[in-house]
Amino acid sequence: MKLHIEYEQQPEYPLDREETSKLNWRVEKMSLSKDKTQLKYNSFLTLSNIPPQVYEYRLGNRSALEWVIDQYRVSTDKRSGIVNDPNREEDPEYIVRLIGEVITVSLETVRRVKELAALPIQ
């Protein structure tokens, strides 16, 4: 429980970072590569070496990482025109850190569930 409640205090999983252009932490819409080992954050940054076990921890029909990718994007409500922008001016690297933390929590959750499954039931 503590792992999930304190997800933002977990260490970031050490992903490889490929920076390709001018520094820009702003995210519009992220996307995974077909093999799901890379995450295109924006035109500046691609995160890679995402372990496949990350996708074993699921929230409904998708993994926690896929949920973050879907939710942390700029979108506009069609009816009201209100723009939802997850970027934080006061902490521009927040979303990149969150991705690393969510990967850590996902991997640790999968590890712990497997440990529990291996315990003998009496």
Image (tube, helix red, strand yellow):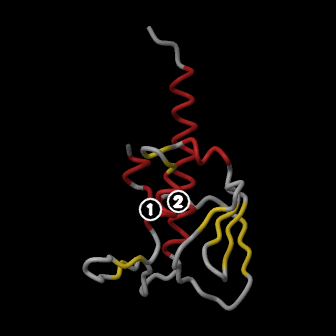
Q: Quadrant of residue 34?
A: bottom right
2 on left or right of 22: left
Q: What residue is disc 2 on? A: 101
Q: What numbered label is drawn on residue 8?
A: 1
Q: Earlier in the sequence, mark 1 or mark 2?
A: 1
- In what element is the residue under mark 2? helix
- 110 up-or-down from 21: above or below: above
Question: Which residue shows up at 62% across the image and 58% down it?
Answer: 13
- Labelled pair 1, 2 in contact (Cβ < 8 Å): yes
Q: What numbered label is drawn on residue 58?
A: none
Where's the N terminus, which quadrant?
top left
Amino acid, disc 1: Glu
Amino acid, disc 2: Glu
User: Residue 78: image x %, image y %?
Assistant: 32, 77
Where's the C terminus, which quadrant?
top left
Tell which of 12 and 26 is nearer to you: 26
Tell which of 72 and 96 is nearer to you: 72
Q: Quadrant of residue 30?
A: bottom right
- 37 up-or-down from 29: above or below: above
